[in-house]
Image (spheres, helix red, strand yellow):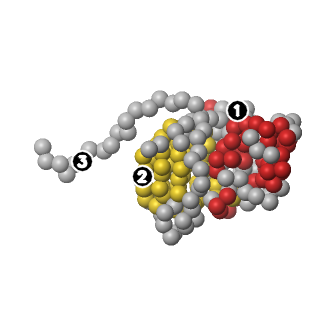
Amino acid sequence: MTQIGNRLRHLRLQRSMSLRTLAGMLGISASALSQLETGRRSPSLERLHQIVAALDYPLNAVFDDDSGRDENPHAGEEERFPGQTSEDLAGVIIQRALQAPAVILAGNIEWTAAAPMQVSGLDLLRVTYPAGAQPAEPVTHTGVEIVHVVQGTLRFEVGDERSELSNGDSIMYNAKTPHRISNPTKEPASAIWTVIEGTCQLRPAQHPPNHGEVG
């Protein structure tokens, strides 16, 4: 499990930014930011988005790069090559379930990296909400979110719309629209989150024909 506070501090130092400067950009005190970096408090989902945006990092930067992917005799096929493109990808890259880096946010919401390596402009996460999880604030950020529920039930409040999705259901929305996700049930719920940065071309999904229909 990645210590989210340590990771946020590392990212800030990578940008050569002082604690006070980042805190000022976030509109909070340096003391409050220090509590997040030292692990005395866990960041909310909204605050985490604000921090990575202020530091100009993608969401998946919160996962420690040293969290293990498979190191085995075929490791040469699984190395990550920063700066290269999908055209340079050879072989396969495997991330075992127990190796997936994860972080715990406020309210015990767990983010787990679902992709074996980072992909520019794309974040792929498995997010688990404990029973009764009720994040306090709506979140807004750039990009498009596509969510596929794989366990339990999640409630999505996107703008003025409210929907409950269960196992197998999917939802898509512009992440600039204020959105809030909660778990209204007494059981944990998980979903696969795809966050696409920037703009993307949209077109209706092609659904298979209903062969039961009579012409």
Q: Give the SS element for disc 3.
A: loop
Q: Quadrant of residue 61?
A: top right
Q: Which residue is mark 2?
A: 163
Outermost residue, bottom side: 186
Whether residue 15 is visible here, answered yes or no, is yes
Mark 2 touches mark 3? (CB < 8 Å): no
Q: Position of residue 108 (x, y in %)?
A: 65, 62
Q: Give the SS element for disc 1.
A: loop
Q: Which residue is mark 1?
A: 84
Give the side of residue 111 with respect to residue 189, left or right. Answer: right
* In this rendering, the label closer to the viewer, 2 or 3: 2
Residue at position x 83%, y 37% in the image: 21
Q: CA distance from mark 3 to mark 1?
A: 43 Å
Residue at position x 66%, y 32% in the image: 85
Q: CA distance from mark 2 to mark 1?
A: 40 Å
Looking at this view, is 149 or 22 the one in front?
22
Residue at position x 40%, y 32% in the image: 203
Question: Which is nearer the N-term, disc 2 or disc 3?
Answer: 2
Name above or below for residue 168 compared with residue 46. below
Q: Position of residue 139 (x, y in %)?
A: 59, 45
Whether residue 100 is visible here, answered yes or no, is no
Which quadrant would the C terminus be assigned to in this image?
top left
Q: Amino acid at mark 2?
A: Ser
Q: Which residue is mark 3?
A: 210
Q: CA distance from mark 2 to mark 3?
A: 25 Å
Residue at position x 13%, y 47% in the image: 214
Question: Which is nearer the N-term, disc 2 or disc 1?
Answer: 1
